Amino acid sequence: MSLFARKVDTPSRSFLSVATYNNDIFSYTTGLNNRYVEVGSLTAVSGANSSTCPKGRILRENGRKLFPGANPGINSYMVGVYDAISGIAGFIDPNSPVYTVFSTEKTYAVTDSTDPGPGGLLDQGMPILTNSSVEAGTYVSAGSNVSAGIDVDAGRDVNASRDVNAGRNVNAVGNVDVSGNINLAGRLVLNTGNTGIISMTGGTVHGSFKKLTVTAPNCRTGSIVMLTYAGQNNIGVLSAEVISNGSFQIVSSNTSDAGNVMWLIVN
């Protein structure tokens, strides 16, 4: 008997799903076509759905590989993985935007673990520390803070359960949803559908009041409308009334009001 045991390579890489992955894991089958040529195809995994394949699940490599050219019907390098919780198994593209590398150290025999440091959180993805850019094609979601020394730019939504801190601008094409504070060293700039200036000279007198209807596409029933004068000319006491979808009414207590009124809609 040899005194030296041969090293057996066991899969040690695992991936973390950053979104539901049922549409990004596949079964691979091969067969012969009518010309007796071997063909292969990727198909949906039986039992894979949004419930059995949730975000935050760890997928472990099982050692199987698929290579373009070597395996018929394969155009991308694929690795075999399995989900120890649901039992779902199949092939994934390891560079898919649905997955990030979780570990290259743990073998399939090592179970999920909890960080022994403060907080005791279940191990998931690694943090990112960079002097360059972090760009996201979809969402940037934070369980705590989103902090930026300069700008926060998002093509869609910025979601944070605590604070968003920016040294300059927060730019989002979609929504900025924050349950904590928004702290800006710069300005808060709202789009034109939520703010504007209008002259009360265009209003009409109703009894002892002057009223002016303002068309505002972002106004909704239940919106908060804030009013102040941007220019004074026979000013009165202002109130916002008849707030509805697409418009609201400015009411002044002075029938001669010709001031410029600045309005702001908060939904």
Image (spheres, rainbow, N blue to C red):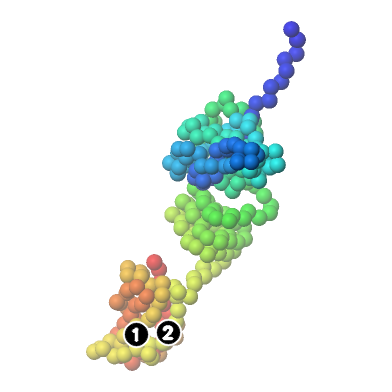
The numbered mark at residue 212 is 1
Residue type, mark 2 in image:
Ile
Quadrant of image for the C terminus: bottom left
Check disc 2 and report its element: helix, strand or loop: strand
User: Taking 214 as reference, is 9 left or right?
Assistant: right
Q: Nearer the viewer, residue 138 or 240?
A: 138
Q: Which residue is mark 2?
A: 198
- The quadrant of the image that shows the N terminus is top right
Nearer the observer, 163 or 105: 105
Closest to the observer, 126 or 33:
33
Name the residue: 70% across, 42% down.
69
At a point 44% along the width and 82% down the height, the residue shown is 197
Q: Is residue 232 left or right of residue 33?
A: left
Residue 216 percent location from the top left of the image: 40, 77
Q: Earlier in the sequence, mark 2 or mark 1?
A: 2
Percent from the top left, x then y, of residue 151?
60, 61
